[in-house]
Image: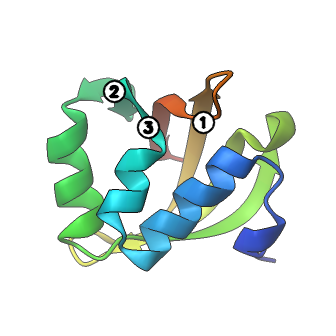
């Protein structure tokens, strides 16, 4: 069963999922610290390149199945035009100002 985005516990993670699903790159970037980093399947990637390829130019979409760690860890079905749909895990480091300084994703 999918968790409605509006019901996700952590405000930063909720805004992240909302921005991904709305294909709103500007809102997405506003959620991140200036020095934010990310990893996919354990390998660090250039954040700007990765989000353009995996989210924004390929119409990425997240449907969250469950959350843990106070809403900062998700298991979700992720789909985009490049890879189709896959079961993924996401984890987020959220700073005191509410912005995301790191996210990690990979196959679940």
Considering the numbered disc 3 on the image, is that residue within a helix, a strand or a loop? strand
Looking at the rendering, in which quadrant would you find the N terminus? bottom right
Where does residue 99 sit, x and y in percent of width and height? 56, 34
In front of the other: label 1 or label 2?
2
| Cβ–Cβ under 8 Å for marks 2 and 3 | yes
Where does residue 80 sit, x and y in percent of width and height? 32, 73
* Mark pair 3, 1: CA separation: 14 Å
Q: Which mark is residue 34?
A: 2
In this rendering, position of residue 56 left or right of residue 95? left
* Mark pair 1, 2: CA separation: 18 Å
Q: Residue at x 73, y 50 (%)?
A: 11
Whether residue 3 appears in this view of the structure is no
Give the mark nearer the N terminus: 3 vs 1. 3
Q: Residue at x 83, y 52 (%)?
A: 9
Residue pointed to by mark 1? 91
Considering the numbered disc 2 on the image, is that residue within a helix, a strand or a loop? strand
Task: Work out whether residue 8 or residue 107 is closer to the camera in this orientation and state it.
Answer: 8
In this rendering, position of residue 93 left or right of residue 82? right
Give the mark nearer the N terminus: 1 vs 2. 2
Residue pointed to by mark 3? 32
Q: Residue at x 17, y 70 (%)?
A: 57
Q: Is residue 56 above or below residue 67?
A: below
């Amino acid at each position: 069963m999918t968790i409605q985005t509006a019901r996700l516990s952590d405000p930063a993670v909720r805004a992240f999922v909302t921005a991904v699903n709305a294909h709103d790159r500007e809102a997405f970037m506003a959620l991140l610290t200036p020095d934010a980093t990310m990893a996919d399947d354990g390998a660090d990637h250039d954040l700007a390149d990765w989000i353009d390829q995996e989210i924004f130019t390929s119409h990425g979409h997240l449907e969250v199945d469950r959350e843990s760690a106070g809403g900062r860890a998700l298991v979700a079905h992720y789909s985009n035009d490049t890879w189709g749909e896959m079961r993924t895990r996401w984890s987020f480091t959220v700073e005191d100002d509410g912005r995301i300084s790191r996210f990690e994703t990979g196959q679940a």
